[in-house]
Image (tube, grey):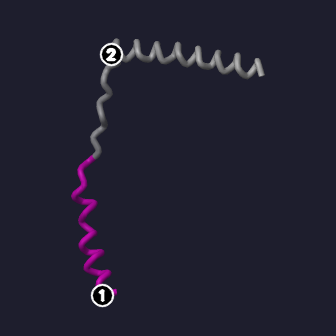
Amino acid sequence: MKNLLPLSLALLPLPALAEGFERPIPLPQTAAAEVTFLIASIVMILMLGAVHYLVNRR
């Protein structure tokens, strides 16, 4: 109990020293990101079609 009081007093001011939250600013979408997303979407549709084919064949 003796050691608990100094520890609690030492931890008391820590939240007061914390910085405020700064909201991140979203970056605009680039053309490269859109092309990458398009390619990934097409590949995903092709893979879903392949799974559909394999499951129906079984």
- From the image, which quarter does the N terminus lie in? bottom left
In the picture, measured across the screen, residue 18 lies left or right of residue 56, that is left
Q: Mark 2 points at which residue?
A: 30
Quadrant location, the C terminus: top right
Q: In terms of secondary structure, where does tag 1 sit?
A: loop
**Residue 57 at x, y percent in the picture:** 76, 18
Task: Between residue 41 and residue 26, name the one nearer to us.
Answer: 41
| Res 12 quadrant in image | bottom left
Q: How far apart are marks 2 and 1 (CA)?
A: 60 Å
Residue 2 image label: 1
40 magenta-colored: no
Amino acid carrying mark 1 in the image: Lys
Q: Is mark 2 on a helix, strand or loop?
A: loop
- Tell me the kind of residue under disc 2: Thr
Quick one: 15 or 58, which is closer to the camera? 58
Give the extent of the magenta segment.
1-20
Where residue 11 sits in the image (x, y, percent)?
Answer: 27, 69
Is residue 47 left or right of 6 when viewed as pictured?
Answer: right
Task: Pick the residue in front: 2 or 23.
Answer: 2
Residue drawn at x 26%, y 75% as measured from the top left: 9
- Expressed as whole percent of the image width and height from the top left, the position of residue 47 reads 59, 18
Which residue lies at the image location 24% right of the left edge and 72% below the top edge?
10
What is the residue that sits farthest to the left in this orientation?
A: 17
